[in-house]
Amino acid sequence: MAFSRISMVSTVIVLLVFLFSHQPSTFVRADDELIRRVCHNSDAPTACNQCVKADNRTSVYQDDFAANGTITQCREELSYAKADLDAAIQDLKNGDYDASDKSVFNALLYQNSCESELKNNPKIRITYHINFGFNMYEALSHIALRIINRL
């Protein structure tokens, strides 16, 4: 019984990681330095550069330092959230359910902070897909937390 719960929690957390990995990019300001920093850490930096530069929305926030700061902060928070989700998976494998619960909760806090920052900046337009991703992430996080709490 406990094994199936662990398997279910692992599946939910893997879905969360997958969701983070396939989120539409929120980096609508795309000066060369930002593109270099963001794409440098991606799995395919060349393709990342080409995609971001090809997006006609990329120059929208070029001179808006407040929006730029918000987007950069959000990027950092989402990378911390992904690291927490990776830690949660490892904690589950090690049987440390309290640590796994804490990691999923912390990842959710990072995601909520990012979402709040984006929504509170009136100059940033959140697309349907990004909003859907935030909502799906939150729902899956709550499912994972409920399952972990029952282990």
Image (spheres, rainbow, N blue to C red):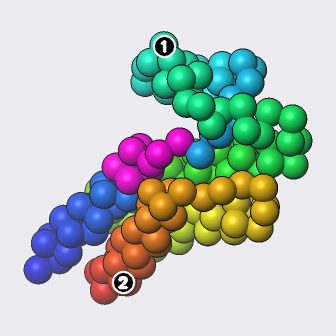
Q: Nearer the viewer, residue 13 or 136?
A: 136
Residue found at x 65% / y 33%? 58
Looking at the rendered structure, the secondary structure element under dot 2 is helix
- The spot of residue 87 in percent (x, y) is 45, 53
Image quadrant holding the N terminus, namely bottom left
Write down the region rendered in magenta: 17-25
Looking at the rendered structure, the secondary structure element under dot 1 is helix
Residue 99 belongs to the span the image colors magenta: no
Using residue 129 as the reference point, say whether residue 52 is left or right of it: right
Q: Nearer the viewer, residue 19 or 94?
A: 19
Q: Amino acid at mark 1?
A: Thr
Q: Nearer the viewer, residue 127 or 45?
A: 127
Say whether residue 107 is visible: no
Q: Amino acid at mark 2?
A: Arg
The residue that label 1 is drawn on is 46
Residue found at x 78% / y 56%? 123
Residue 20 belongs to the span the image colors magenta: yes
